Image (spheres, grey):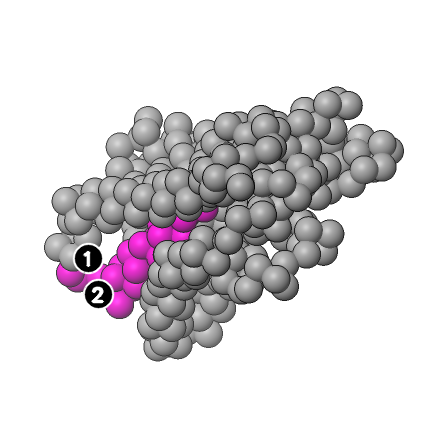
């Protein structure tokens, strides 16, 4: 009888989003452009924040952390995916597969937590502006960021450790563009119930906890916006909030649907495109939505002098 920690699979085959050669070339072009935009946008934000002291505020501190996470998030999967589109060899070693999963889940968890922290930061700035500097001290900001990184890495380490002891004997073909938890469960011939239970518990705590915290913060933010006297002021604030909420809803909605459900309902054919939304599109949009539209960042890029203000949403 095969031991639980043994495996008959030494590598996996990543089929990607399409097996059609012509479609693969199109996908290569599209995702190369998306990857470059995501990298340039996030690197630009990091450079602007680090080089200009006027952006050394709690809000931009968290945005800088988010940019680092987004670079790691996309880089954990896209280079391999792009290489596979140009190569006949679409294999990835078991160690490489496990490493890819670890980093993807790590950055995904950290992003969830950072979005929740950033929503709380905006809530404090809008609803308690006079006490903002006291409530969002640098010590607290550093602790919140460190906690997001620590919890995200710990969550992923637990999932990766349990995945590493599973046995795989149901083939090695993944109809996916990277090694993810649900499709790997389907190839395992071990009992994955403990892993799935932990995915619900840990994943649910990180994802749903961050989501609920974000929603509560935005509820208070919207109530504060409704108290703005001028119609123009309300419309401007709602316009900014709407773009944030669309990205947050896209991210949390797709990630919850992927991980917080029974693995028996997961389909590699139908659900393999979902990670594109939360693992590729969202990191590309974040710099545009959260930073590059801000007058403070635009002012820095143009060399304009301005007082650093608290972003309303």
Query: Pointer 2: residues within 10 angstroms few (<14), some, or many (20+)?
Result: few
Q: Is residue 128 magenta?
A: yes
Residue name at image x 60 percent, y 32 percent: 9
In the rendered image, is residue 281 in sight? no
From what the image shows, is residue 155 above or below residue 236? above
Left or right of 129? Residue 168 is right
- Residue in front for this viewpoint, 110 or 30: 110
Q: Secondary structure at mark 1?
A: helix
Residue underneath mark 2: 128
Residue 257 in percent (x, y) is at 56, 62
> What's drawn in magenta, residue-wise?
107-131
* Badge 1 vs badge 2, beta-carbon distance below 8 Å: yes
Give the label on residue 132, or none.
1
The quadrant of the image that shows the C terminus is: bottom left
Residue name at image x 47 percent, y 67 percent: 238
Distance from label 1 to label 2 (Cα)?
6 Å
């Amino acid at each position: 009888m095969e031991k639980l920690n043994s495996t008959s699979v030494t590598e996996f085959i990543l089929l990607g989003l399409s097996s059609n050669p012509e479609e693969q070339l199109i996908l290569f072009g599209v995702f190369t452009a998306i990857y470059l935009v995501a990298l340039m946008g996030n690197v630009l934000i990091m450079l602007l924040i680090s080089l200009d002291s006027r952006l050394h505020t709690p809000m931009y501190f968290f945005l800088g952390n988010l940019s680092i996470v987004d670079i790691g998030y996309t880089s954990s999967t896209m280079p391999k995916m792009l290489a596979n589109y140009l190569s006949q060899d679409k294999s990835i070693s078991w160690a490489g597969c496990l490493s890819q999963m670890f980093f993807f889940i790590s950055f995904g968890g950290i992003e969830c937590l950072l979005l929740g922290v950033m929503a709380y930061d905006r809530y404090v700035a809008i609803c308690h502006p006079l006490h903002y500097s006291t409530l969002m001290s640098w010590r607290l900001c550093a602790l919140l960021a460190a906690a997001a990184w620590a919890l995200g890495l710990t969550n992923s380490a637990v999932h990766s450790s349990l995945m590493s002891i599973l046995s795989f004997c149901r083939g090695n073909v993944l109809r996916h563009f990277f090694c993810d938890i649900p499709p790997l469960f389907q190839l395992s011939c071990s009992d994955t119930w403990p892993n799935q239970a932990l995915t619900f518990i840990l994943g649910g705590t990180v994802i749903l906890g961050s989501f609920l915290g974000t929603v509560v913060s935005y509820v208070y933010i919207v109530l504060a916006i409704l108290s703005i006297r001028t119609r123009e002021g309300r419309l401007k604030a709602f316009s900014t909030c709407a773009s944030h909420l669309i990205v947050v809803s896209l991210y949390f909605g797709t990630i919850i649907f992927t991980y917080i459900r029974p693995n028996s309902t997961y389909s590699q054919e139908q659900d393999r495109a979902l990670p594109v939304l939360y693992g590729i599109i969202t990191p590309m949009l974040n710099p545009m939505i959260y930073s590059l539209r801000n007058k403070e960042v635009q002012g820095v890029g143009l060399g304009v002098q301005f007082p650093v203000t608290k972003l309303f949403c």
